[in-house]
Image (cartoon, helix red, strand yellow):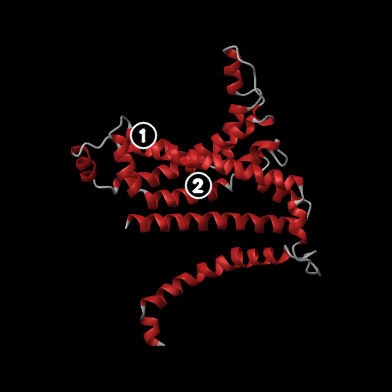
Amino acid sequence: MKRWLRKDASAAMMFLVPSGVGFSVFYLIPFVMGVFYSFMDSTVGGHFVGFDNYRELLASGSFRKAASNTFYFSAVSVPLMLALSLGLAMLLNQSAYLRRWLRTAYVLPLVVPVASIVMIWQILFDWNGSLNAWLSHFGGARVDWMKTDSARIVVIVVYLWKNIGYNVILFLAGLQQIPKDYYETAQIEGAGRLRQFRSITLVYLTSTMFFVVIMSIINSFKVFRETYLIAGDYPHDSIYMMQHYMNNMFMSLDIQKLTAAATLMFGCILLIVMGLFMLERRHRQYME
């Protein structure tokens, strides 16, 4: 026993036990219970019904709408996030004017509470907001941003503005790890900027880009806070997300559909992440 206590592994386990207990009590056990309830017809004294809850869920028009909107949002916002954050990181990695102030400006949205951010965007995109005032001043027509298909654009812009600073920091850290000698050698060999970007920058940012893509996908599935605070329980159809559906099922105490939707959402995210891991592993083997 004394030898085991003297080992580093035992000390590490003792430090990890409190976090492991908290993770199990507040995350793992509720998730397992949720998966179990998704196969029952009631949470109290229920009976096993197999995949009946999932069949009813897939037959629901509101669920299909929420799922399609969520995947559309992720498919559009994640590539935009990746391209913009990488471009800004490359710009800030150069000796640009006011570089330190620009870095601080991109990080500031991370520390501002979501409620404050939403209040600012509401003032900007309201029917009587600043953007419509500018449009009317220059002779344009007012747009009801949150009650038309334009609401989807608003949510994408808010998501990019809120999360782009974190990805810029990650890309900056990756760019600063690339030796400058590689770029100097490439210039001597006659390689242009595009070739340097493709053969040096992208190659050495593979691990960072992989992590950024995963975090961006996960954050895109958590955009409910912004849309809920901006548009409420039942927003425009274009921004009715999976979290809206699950929140409404919780309010109506339809726990079976709620847990089934949460399980499907977890399964989709897991499949996407596993696919990205496979792509990253193949790319690493190819580079070796």
Q: Earlier in the sequence, mark 2 or mark 1?
A: 1
User: Percent position (x, y) of residue 14?
Assistant: 45, 74
Q: Is residue 185 left or right of residue 166?
A: left
Mark 1 burial class by Cα count in 10 Å: few <14, some 14-19, many 20+ = few
User: In this orientation, which residue lies closer to the viewer: 126 or 211?
Assistant: 211
User: Percent position (x, y) of residue 260?
Assistant: 70, 58
Position of 25 relative to 96 (above/below): below
Quadrant (top left/top right/bottom left/bottom right) for the C terminus: bottom left
User: Percent position (x, y) of residue 107?
Assistant: 43, 40
Element class at badge 2: helix
What residue is shown with label 2? 216
Mark 2 burial class by Cα count in 10 Å: few <14, some 14-19, many 20+ = many
Q: Which amino acid does label 2 sit on?
A: Ser
Q: In this view, does 243 lie to the left or right of 271?
A: right
Position of 5 relative to 170 (above/below): below
Name the residue rendered at 76%, 59% in the picture.
53
Position of 210 relative to 135 (above/below): below
Position of 115 relative to 257 (above/below): above
What residue is shown with label 1? 101
Quadrant (top left/top right/bottom left/bottom right) for the N terminus: bottom left
Name the residue rendered at 71%, 46% in the picture.
64
The answer to which quarter of the image holds residue 237 is top right
User: Percent position (x, y) of residue 166?
Assistant: 44, 45
Q: Is residue 160 left or right of residue 62?
A: left
Q: Which amino acid does label 1 sit on?
A: Trp
Q: In this view, does 204 lie to the left or right of 13?
A: left
Element class at badge 1: helix
